[in-house]
Amino acid sequence: MPPNQGVLTVGAADADTGTSAEIQYSLFGIGVEDFYMDANTGDMKTATVMDREETSSYKLIAQATDGGGLFCRSEVSVTLLDVNDNPPTFFYSQYLANVYENAAPKALLTRLQASDPDEGPNRTVVYSLIDSADGFFSIDPVSGVVVLERALDRETRDSYRIRIQASDRSGLQGALSSQVSYMVGHRSV
């Protein structure tokens, strides 16, 4: 959430008259520096860029003080909702695996892992291959397990590089993704 976004307006009434009835508003508590409260109107706005992954909620105190120094206080709870602002990230920048030449098709080679600090569907990671090295490999979209689809022949080709993508399930907000290289070398039996 950008700065200067309206959050809420607090209000108070005073039965006094004259300057004793003039109310000034203020805000207290941990994280108060992330907000601005207009002393005359009670309008509360964001003062900084807000990021739910850094601070997800605030418990603040709004105070209304009249011209005579009397005051009342009320708790203000602010909860930030998630937006899809973080792509999934792989735990490692590159993955390596060695496969024996006689490994059977459907052999499970390795599991790639990525995480996303967003919430809800924005947090769910889906794995896919950008290329499958001519159909030699597949990946389970949920678990991230790389599977051998066809038998390898070391004499024909001794290594493979495939690119794998991790995307989030963001729905209408637009999927964010990251990519990683996966090197497969194979050994003779």
Image: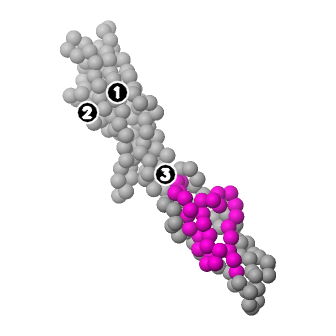
Question: Callout 3: helix, strand or loop?
Answer: loop
Query: As shown in the figure, which amino acid type bears the numbered disc 2?
Result: Asp
Name which of mark 1 and mark 3 comes first in the sequence. 3
Work out how far the residue at label 2 is from the one at label 1, CA to CA, in angstroms: 11 Å
Q: Which residues are magenta?
A: 23-52
> Vertical placement of 131 versus 28: above or below?
above
Query: As shown in the figure, which amino acid type bears the numbered disc 3?
Result: Glu
- The answer to whether residue 106 is visible is no
Q: Are marks 1 and 3 in contact (CB under 8 Å)?
A: no
> Residue 71 at what x, y percent from top left?
77, 76
Q: Residue at x 31, y 15 (%)?
A: 186
Q: Residue at x 53, y 54 (%)?
A: 52
Residue 122 placement, left or right of 29: left
Question: Residue 119's mark?
Answer: 3
Q: Residue at x 56, y 62 (%)?
A: 47
The residue tagged 2 is 131
Check the image and name the residue furthest to the front: 19
Query: As shown in the figure, which amino acid type bears the numbered disc 1?
Result: Tyr
Residue 69 placement, left or right of 123: right
The residue tagged 1 is 182
Question: Callout 2: helix, strand or loop?
Answer: loop
Work out how far the residue at label 1 is from the one at label 3, CA to CA, in angstroms: 28 Å
Q: Along the line of sight, which residue is nearer the eye, 135 or 90?
A: 90
> Vertical placement of 131 versus 36: above or below?
above
Q: Residue at x 26, y 15 (%)?
A: 158
- The answer to whether residue 145 is visible is yes
Name which of mark 3 and mark 2 comes first in the sequence. 3
